[in-house]
Structures are given as C-alpha cells and as structure tokens.
Image (cartoon, rainbow, N blue to C red):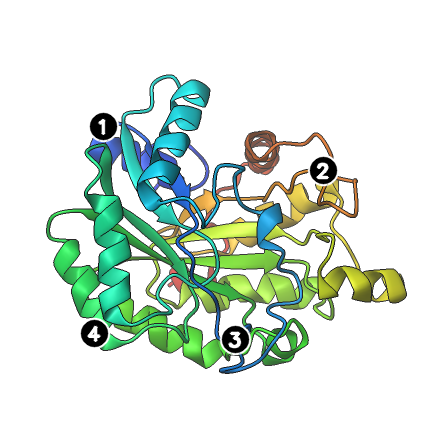
C-alpha cells in the first residue's frame, strides 16, 4: 500500500520527505547564539520553563562563548563522523528563544551562519510569543534562497498545563503564531511534550485532533523526562505521586494511537527525545535511542495494520 505521503512507510516521516525533496537527508548543526527567553529575563516571568535545563538538550560543542562559525565547524566535524553520507546541512538555532532580539541582531547572527559555505539554511527554535511580522517577513525573504524552518515550542494545548510548567504564553498565542508563519509559506513545525503532569491519557490523545486543525508542516514529540537541576525535578522529588510516566512499552502503544488520529499531511520529525544520562533523573528509558523507538512504533502499526491518520475524524467524510 502506498500511503498519502507517497511511500510504504506507515507514518509520514519528515526525513523521508526531505530525501524526496532534496535528494538527501538534512542534518542540523546546533548553535547556541546567546539568546534568552521572556520568561527568564522578567518580561513575562522568571525561572524559565519548569522542565528546561538547556545543557541537557544541547550537543557538547554548543557554547555561546564560541563564535557561530566555530560552533558550525565543530558541529560539522561531529556530524560528518557520525553520518558518513551527510551532504546537506542547516544551522539549528536551538538554545532558548532564537527570535527574541531586535531584528538587527537576528540578521547579524542568522547571516553569520548562512555565510558558511556548507550551510544551506536555518532551522530556528523559538516561542510563539517571540515572533512578529517584521521577523517573519525577513525570514520569508531568506526563504527565497535558503531552506528556512521555524520550530515553535507549543508543548501542550491546555492552558492549565502551560501555566503549571511556567511557559508564560497561551495556546492561543501558538495558534496565532503558527497561522502567521504558515501564511508566509514558511515551513512551520511544533514541539509537543507527551506526559506533562496533570494531563490524563485521554487529554493527551485528544491533542492529536487539535493539532490536526493547525496549518503546521511537521512535529517533534518528546516524552516527559525529568532533567536534573530544574524546577520540575524538584517538584517530582517532592510529589512523585503527581507524575504518571509513560514507560517505553506504553509509549509505543500510545503513540500508535496518537498517530492514528493525526492528520497524515503532518510530517513527524521526532518521536522521542534523548537526555544524556548525567542529566536524566529517571533511568527507565536508559539505553533506548530515538531510532529504536521509531522501529517499535512502526512494528506496532504493522501489528494493527494501521497508519497515520487512519482514525482521524476529520478525514472520515
């Protein structure tokens, strides 16, 4: 069977989409460009998101005291060693909110990355309350020549959850930012955390239908992980009974359910995150890599004879 995304794989893989589009996979070279966030500097809050310890999510070569060019060189060496056939690279502005600065600073740092001869574009991680029309118009201009992707940290569709994890923005902020970005023809991706405290399994699954109504191109899923030296870690240590984690076997079954309800036009970039063991407070996922999670989810879909979007209520008519 050939599925709506054009191949026999049972979910819409962003990596496969890029291979078809560009003839090879895209490798991201992570960068820490020295930005911060509005819920760290006091504009909307302090302390940052309760789950965030940026050191637990960034490669070892990302240090803001290093120039962007040096970080790119270090990243390229790492990626070319790990992925022998890597040919196409984009600079991934990963740390904190990478549109949270005056346009003059953004241009300086983006163009510093684009000036590297082996960088073909930008992937920009940011928050939905850190974008404006001037920045979007500039990114749309860059997209005429370069690969430009925007990744918004949405994390949850529920206001109570967003308040609890100290996001400092609403889900409506996400909806509006996604709409404005999509209207300019920019590749629009989102991040979601599966298993945030206070959310039931039914609520988490219901988000598949909410997300399906958004004009997004791709999505990254992260299972809830407790990263050391974060407010969430302190909360967990004080009240562990309030947390209900997905163990790997449960997560595979749940994500198959989620996929069945997700619009097939949305490409999946990642199913699970990997926190270095030194930062991970809970070890239940230790040793399980994200590529192994993909294989397990595909096996579960095959066992069910199911695929992404099969049960999406918006596609039944």
For residue 261, side relative to residue 30 (left or right): right
- Which residue corresponds to the image point at 39% horizontal and 25% vertical from the top-left? 77
User: Which residue was labeled with disc 3?
Assistant: 41
Quadrant containing the C terminus is bottom left
Work out whether residue 257 can be spotted: no
Task: Give how far apart the Cα atoms at labels 1 and 3 are.
Answer: 42 Å
User: Which residue was labeled with disc 4?
Assistant: 134
Using a 10 Å C-alpha cutoff, classify the residue at mark 4 as few (fewer than 14 neighbours), some (14 to 19) or many (20 or more): few
For residue 235, side relative to residue 92 (left or right): right
Quadrant containing the N terminus is top left
Along the polypeptide, which appears first: circle 4 or circle 1? Answer: 1
Question: Which callout, 3 or 4, points to the residue nearer the camera?
Answer: 3
- Which residue corresponds to the image point at 58% horizontal and 75% vertical from the top-left? 158
Judging depth in this view, the residue of 314 and 286 nearest the camera is 286
User: Which residue was labeled with disc 1?
Assistant: 23
Q: How far across and down, in percent of the image, does residue 132 sit?
A: 28, 76
Along the polypeptide, which appears first: circle 2 or circle 3? Answer: 3
Q: Which mark is residue 277?
A: 2
Name of the residue lying farthest toward the front: 65
- Which residue corresponds to the image point at 17% horizontal and 47% vertical from the top-left? 146
Q: How far across and down, in percent of the image, does residue 64 sit?
A: 45, 50
């Amino acid at each position: 069977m050939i599925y709506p995304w054009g191949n026999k794989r049972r979910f819409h893989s962003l990596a496969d989409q890029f291979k078809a589009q560009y003839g090879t996979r895209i490798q991201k070279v992570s960068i820490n460009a020295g930005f911060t966030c509005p819920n760290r500097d006091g504009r909307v809050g302090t302390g940052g998101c309760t789950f965030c310890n940026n050191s637990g999510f960034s490669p070892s070569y990302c240090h803001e005291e290093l120039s962007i060019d040096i970080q790119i060189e270090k990243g390229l060496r790492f990626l070319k060693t790990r992925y022998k056939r890597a040919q196409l690279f984009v600079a991934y502005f990963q740390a904190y909110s990478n549109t949270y600065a005056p346009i003059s600073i953004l241009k300086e740092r983006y163009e510093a990355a684009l000036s590297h001869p082996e960088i073909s574009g930008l992937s920009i991680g940011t928050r939905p309350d850190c974008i404006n029309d001037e920045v979007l118009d500039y990114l749309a201009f860059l997209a005429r020549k370069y690969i430009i992707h925007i990744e918004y940290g949405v994390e949850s569709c529920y206001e109570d959850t967003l308040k609890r994890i100290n996001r400092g923005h609403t889900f409506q902020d996400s909806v509006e930012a996604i709409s404005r970005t999509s209207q300019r023809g920019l590749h629009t991706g989102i991040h979601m955390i599966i298993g945030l405290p206070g959310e039931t399994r039914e609520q988490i699954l219901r988000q598949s239908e909410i997300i399906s109504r958004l004009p997004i191109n791709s999505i990254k899923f992260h299972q809830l992980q407790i990263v050391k030296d974060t407010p969430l870690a302190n909360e967990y240590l004080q009240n562990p009974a309030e947390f209900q984690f997905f163990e790997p076997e449960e997560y595979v079954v749940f994500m198959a359910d989620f996929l069945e309800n997700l619009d097939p036009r949305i490409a999946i970039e990642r199913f699970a995150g990997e926190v270095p063991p030194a930062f991970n407070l809970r070890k239940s996922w230790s040793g399980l890599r994200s590529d192994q999670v993909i294989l397990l989810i595909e096996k579960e879909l095959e066992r069910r004879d199911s695929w992404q979007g099969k049960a999406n209520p918006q596609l039944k008519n």
